[in-house]
Amino acid sequence: MDDNTDFDIKSLIGNIFSHLESGNISDLLMPKNNEDFSDVYSLACDYYDKGLIEQAENIFRSLCLYDFSNVDYLLGLAAVKQVQKQYQKAINLYSLAINLDENNASIYLYAGQCYLYTGEKESAISSFNHCLSLACNDNEREQAIHYISMLEGGLCVWKIG
């Protein structure tokens, strides 16, 4: 980790604790200044991609505490929960992300995968269909169609790969 990223993480954590200590919860949930934590976010994504899930979770959780209205931070934490097989927590986070960006097809695809793992077939199909109704990319479309055909065909799939 380079010095700039280390400084960004310390700055983020300092801001979080500053809000908590001062009791400015509304400021914590809706920050007034738009500090750029893109390096910290990139580090969390890098940890996630390398399979360093605990480290990624810690950073995504801190980012969410700092700016709970940032969809990317929520999606990062939701993805961590999905990888950790904490599907209901992931579904809850994806639901929050949908409230912030209801036109993001990816969110519905990922939520559908979690519903699939929890055995909630109808919710999974609904999520995959909603993904298809939005402007999804070819990969998302292909995956959603595949999951729907498996679920409607009666196949029980517990491993998504």
Image (cartoon, rainbow, N blue to C red):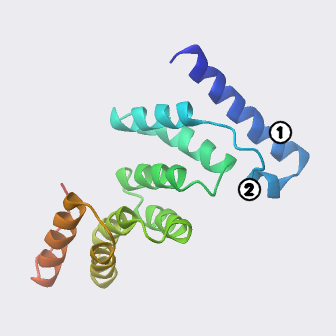
Please tell me whether residue 54 is drawn above or below residue 106 in the rendered image: above
Left or right of residue 124, residue 94 in this image: right
**Residue placed under numbered mark 2 in the picture:** 30
Kindly identify the amino acid type of the residue bearing the numbered disc 1. Answer: Ser
Q: Kindly identify the residue that appears in the image at 69 percent across and 38 percent down.
A: 35
- Furthest-front residue in this view: 135
Q: Find residue 18 and name its label.
A: 1
Please tell me whether residue 45 is drawn above or below residue 119 in the rendered image: above
Please tell me whether residue 24 is drawn above or below residue 17 in the rendered image: below
Q: Kindly identify the residue that appears in the image at 43 percent across and 70 percent down.
A: 103
- Furthest-top residue in this view: 3
Q: Kindly identify the residue that appears in the image at 47 percent across and 34 percent down.
A: 42
| Mark 1 or mark 2: whose residue is earlier in sequence | 1
Residue neighbourhood size for the residue with mark 1, other residues' Cα within 10 Å, grouped as few (<14), some (14–19), many (≥20): few
Rendering quarter of residue 39:
top right
Q: Secondary structure at mark 1?
A: helix
Mark pair 1, 2: CA separation: 14 Å
Q: Position of residue 161 (x, y in %)?
A: 18, 54
Left or right of residue 98, residue 20 in this image: right
Evaluate whether residue 159 shows in this view: no
Q: Position of residue 155 (x, y in %)?
A: 10, 76
Q: Position of residue 121 (x, y in %)?
A: 27, 81
Left or right of residue 58, residue 118 in this image: left
Q: Kindly identify the residue that appears in the image at 12 percent across and 77 percent down.
A: 149
